[in-house]
């Protein structure tokens, strides 16, 4: 459990809040590249960390993420004309470039000195791995996380997003909670996927036979290394190592045959706060050793893919409004929840808590160790920042060049760092 | 009128409020038995007195009404698996029995001492008269009201519920307001019903000819006895005696020939607070001397029955959103309101006041005597409870074994207690 | 920009607020006559200045605008029976005349002295120009504005209304902002209208060639005279003179050939507060020298008319929910906004600011002079009223007998008052 005060500190991310300040130290995923693909195409509305913004790609292909409102009389720039290297407000034609500079005020006498005062808020952006990243802070040394999935060729990764109607923190807590796999995702009807890396019956037996994984957690500058250990037959353990990476990422090991884990595709997630009550669930899928086919990409977007179907606004079709399609008959016979798709199962249970869970009413157990450590780390970093201490990870993208791992090892062996190495690192630094 | 302070005191029923404390002294109708009919069937969401709950029937048929959230990390138990004598949270498999005991924590090392700490809120339930009753208080002497309709054989009663989008108190005030019958329900087109007890043209003539009933009210431990007296030709009065029973029940006399009133079917209602802005309107129909046929039950559920059509969530089809189907042409020609059905007429007028009526703006008359006395009694009991004085009725179910009555009597006679006796009492205690 | 305090003062119009007091000094448009056309017809709900009201036309054709709730127990009078010179509450038959007098209490003993206490709030009404006007204040000297459009024969004017989901003030600010015509309404595809007064290509050239009009503003007792001057070829100016009239009216000059402006149709608007977050956009169209045909009226109500299509509740079909039908392709090719219809363009940009614009974040320019003066005048009058000084215009309807004007004049000439004269004034007082 958490005190009501600490819960507030953990969940609030608006401008000026301690946790909001911490988030504003990090580059964050803002949009899929496909959302503003065309130069001079339609601008899109965007809300992040409680701030209303608008994003556009200018004539030269440059991306702007700027205040949602014109500096003149606060008309909505979403309705603006994206043309000739700027977004032009349709009320009086004032025009802003991707850096928020006011570059034209056709309704007023020309006065270059005035223009500077009319600048609107604009945040730096970068594209990496099919994602438009945004930096909402004011430091010059911030670096984009060097995630493997964001640096492999397009053929080796997929990325998408969907709306989740909860605070970001309870979503992250679901992501780093390796214990729930034995339950929430249990007895899912096996679906053949086209990837060539099928779910391992062996692994699912481990989940069934040992539902009480033993957790250990290592703190580090980039976040947390979370080890969940299950029995795997006499004299051996099945290890799952999940990463929490600051401030809202997870890397989750696959459920394939552990012997193939070093070359199999794996997942990653980000839960980026829209405001205190909603977040974007980003899903990254990396396959460093095998190109995705078009069929595989399509499978991912379907009901059995990792994220489930969404509408044209990336809002999931299944939601609390329709009980996430819960089928009680299938719950009895087919799968543990009666809900289709891992992502929908996660979303259902996280949204069922309400948009901000009341952590003062919880009773945590040993398998919640990662949850406890996650909160402690986030609260510590937020408090340290108030005292002027910057979070190391924000300016050290290399910390993110890691992978999740699964492995079966004899009981007396530990999971070494070689398992977390990305393909690049493996090829540069041979495993000892 | 009521002061703004007293109005607040009257209407608020959340945990810890004075009126909420009073309600928590009484057994209350929670669900229709049909809502969780099957052992191990689907759990249902339930909100009562501002508390979010979930109800389920376990493998042995026992009924649980428990906290809506798991004690672990507050996942919604509605999504849970109802199996093997307990409701199992699908997040980590924690399981709770109908008494809220945590009986299994498969994600954690076994430790029986710990289990006791993981118990969730659970309220005692009982089934009586097709209704699942719940007790949300902490007294051991509370008794379920011994309503006649709840104790006669199934063949002799019907019961249902529908959502009303107002505070409970203005709904009760409509129920005990015998004066409005001459208006709100006036000129309803007569519909033949299949019960064999038709509306009496004579009685409706009394309503029309004397729209200014003279009220008198007796306080008693169980609530109020409300006498409305109308002229009924030379030398005689038409009496209608309505019961208000604590904390939110009414028993309404039928509009049949008064000579048949002792054997005719009669109505009862409960307005059970969902929260401060919504309540369940329960309708009970008792026919102690004549079995209901299936045709009669179907008639009750239709547009001309006492409660009107509802959807699968017991939400009425007619609502403020469609002006309760108000037909101005029929209002001019057919019936007084232009709205079909007594229950819809009542709901329309009560919801038209807003979800909490501003009683500081009222102007009460002599025919509001029952309303005045209802408020006075409820406020008094809530205040007495704050000082430790328990409401007598909460532990004396027998007080509810009464009936409404209508009778035509010579002007010098009073309505005696023999008219309020249930069939049981009549047969045990012969009328003197 | 405006301080946050002044912004609050400007926008809040509920009972007891300074700006609400000022609005309550003026007769205001309440309903179209067509909304309660029939004696004893259906009452309609009405919300003005944050007060819930109900309007009805009685048996004799008299109009009542009264409290939405019965004085007895606050049942909604919308559900009432409009009959025999009064609106009768269907709960207990209490009846109120158009002046709010309680004229019948059939549920209570007769007592004429009591009736006076049961009176409900009622506001005086008058019909002028197809509009039902209401006076929500308490002065005896208030006069209905003597707008020309409201006093010409029916054949010479049209009037309608539509919902706008913003505070009234940002709507007025759009109406008096002559600068935005060069942008927001620019490049509209020319649509032939059936009026015989087509848009002037010459005038639209002025808008295009001089997007920086020079503004001057005259304060007067009735509001503001707003002069916007554009270059119109060598040695001459194109003048547009817009009126702001207290408290929420504008008169806008047409875009026809200036030589015909004295006989051409012109527009007027009112933005009447429903509450702090919504207003009714009234549109008046006056054609003093030419009767409207039925075809012309129909054109007005269509997509290319001044107000755009609305549903049966006068809610616009295009709204923020559907991005006002914004078509990005047409925005690039056809018109400046990609939105059809001048009124929709105005509504889109005003609603895009949010329901109450944050004026503390603005950066006003020279072309915002009228906006600045409007705010200053309204704030001054609201403050003066707090000190007991009444607004002159409220009791001087004749101040509203003015017209907007456009004219091309040599650079050394001014727009004289003869241009603002109504037909009546012109015919009575020949232009010197």
Image (cartoon, coloured by chain):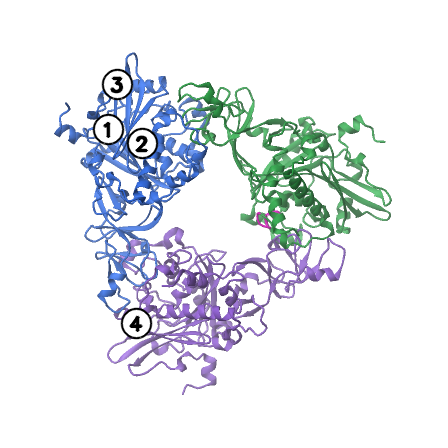
Chain colours: A purple, B blue, C green
Foreground label between 3 and 4: 3
Q: Residue furthest front?
A: B387
Residue at left offset 63%, top offset 43%:
C343
What subunit carries mark 1? B
- Spatial separation of the CA atoms under disc 4 and disc 1: 63 Å
Among the two numbered marks 3 and 2 on one chain, the one whose residue lies closer to the N terminus:
2
Q: Which residue is mark 4?
A: A213
- Spatial separation of the CA atoms under disc 4 and disc 2: 57 Å
Say which element carries label 4: loop
Q: Which residue is mark 3?
A: B408
Among the two numbered marks 2 and 1 on one chain, the one whose residue lies closer to the N terminus:
1
Q: Quadrant of the C terminus of chain B?
A: top left
Q: Residues within 10 Å of mark 3 (few under 14, many from 20)?
A: many
What subunit carries mark 3? B
What subunit carries mark 4? A
Q: Which residue is mark 2?
A: B306
Q: Residues within 10 Å of mark 4 (few under 14, many from 20)?
A: many
Q: Residues within 10 Å of mark 1 (few under 14, many from 20)?
A: many
What subunit carries mark 2? B
Say which element carries label 1: loop
Among the two numbered marks 3 and 1 on one chain, the one whose residue lies closer to the N terminus:
1
Q: Residues within 10 Å of mark 2 (few under 14, many from 20)?
A: some
Q: Position of residue A430 (x, y in %)?
A: 44, 86
Q: Which residue is mark 1?
A: B265
Q: Is residue C393 left or right of residue B58?
A: right
- Spatial separation of the CA atoms under disc 3 and disc 2: 25 Å
Say which element carries label 3: strand
- Spatial separation of the CA atoms under disc 2 and disc 1: 12 Å
- Which residues, given as a range, are shown in magenta? C348-355
């Amino acid at each position: 459990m958490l005190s009501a005060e600490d819960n507030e500190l953990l969940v609030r991310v608006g401008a000026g809040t301690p946790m909001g300040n911490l988030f504003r130290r990090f580059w964050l995923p803002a949009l899929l590249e496909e959302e503003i693909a065309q130069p001079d195409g339609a601008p899109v509305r965007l809300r992040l960390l409680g701030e209303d913004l608008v994003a556009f790609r200018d004539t030269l292909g440059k991306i702007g993420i700027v205040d949602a409102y014109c500096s003149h009389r606060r008309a909505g720039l979403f309705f603006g004309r994206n043309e000739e290297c700027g977004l032009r407000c349709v009320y009086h034609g004032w025009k802003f470039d991707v850096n928020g500079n006011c570059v034209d005020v056709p309704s007023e006498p020309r006065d270059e000195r005035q223009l500077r005062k009319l600048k609107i808020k604009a945040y730096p952006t970068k594209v990496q791995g099919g994602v438009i990243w945004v930096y909402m802070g004011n430091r010059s040394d911030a670096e984009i996380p060097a995630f493997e999935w964001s640096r492999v060729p397009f053929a080796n990764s997929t990325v998408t997003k969907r709306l989740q109607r909860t605070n970001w923190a309870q979503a992250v807590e679901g992501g780093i909670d390796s214990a729930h796999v034995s339950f929430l995702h249990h007895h899912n009807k096996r679906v053949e996927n086209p990837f060539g890396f099928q779910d391992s019956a062996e692994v699912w037996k481990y989940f069934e036979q040992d539902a009480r994984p033993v957790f250990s957690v290592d703190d580090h500058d980039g976040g947390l290394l979370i080890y969940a250990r299950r029995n795997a037959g006499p004299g051996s353990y099945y290890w799952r190592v999940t990463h929490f990476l600051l401030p809202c990422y997870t890397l989750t090991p696959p459920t394939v045959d552990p012997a193939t884990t070093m070359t199999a595709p794996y997942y990653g997630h980000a839960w980026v706060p829209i405001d205190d009550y909603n977040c974007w669930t980003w899903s990254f899928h990396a396959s460093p050793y095998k190109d995705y086919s078009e069929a595989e990409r399509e499978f991912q977007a379907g009901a059995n893919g990792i994220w489930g179907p969404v509408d044209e606004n990336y809002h999931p079709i299944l939601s609390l409004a329709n009980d996430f399609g819960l089928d009680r008959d299938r719950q009895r016979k087919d799968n543990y929840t009666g809900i289709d798709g891992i992502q929908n199962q996660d979303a259902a249970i996280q949204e069922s808590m309400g948009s901000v869970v009341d952590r003062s009413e919880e009773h945590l157990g040993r398998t919640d160790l990662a949850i406890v450590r996650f909160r402690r780390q986030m609260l510590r970093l937020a408090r340290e920042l108030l005292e002027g201490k910057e979070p190391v990870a924000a300016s050290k993208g290399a910390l993110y060049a890691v992978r999740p791992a699964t492995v079966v090892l004899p009981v007396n062996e530990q999971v070494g760092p070689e398992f977390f190495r990305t393909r690049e690192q493996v090829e540069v630094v041979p495993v000892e």
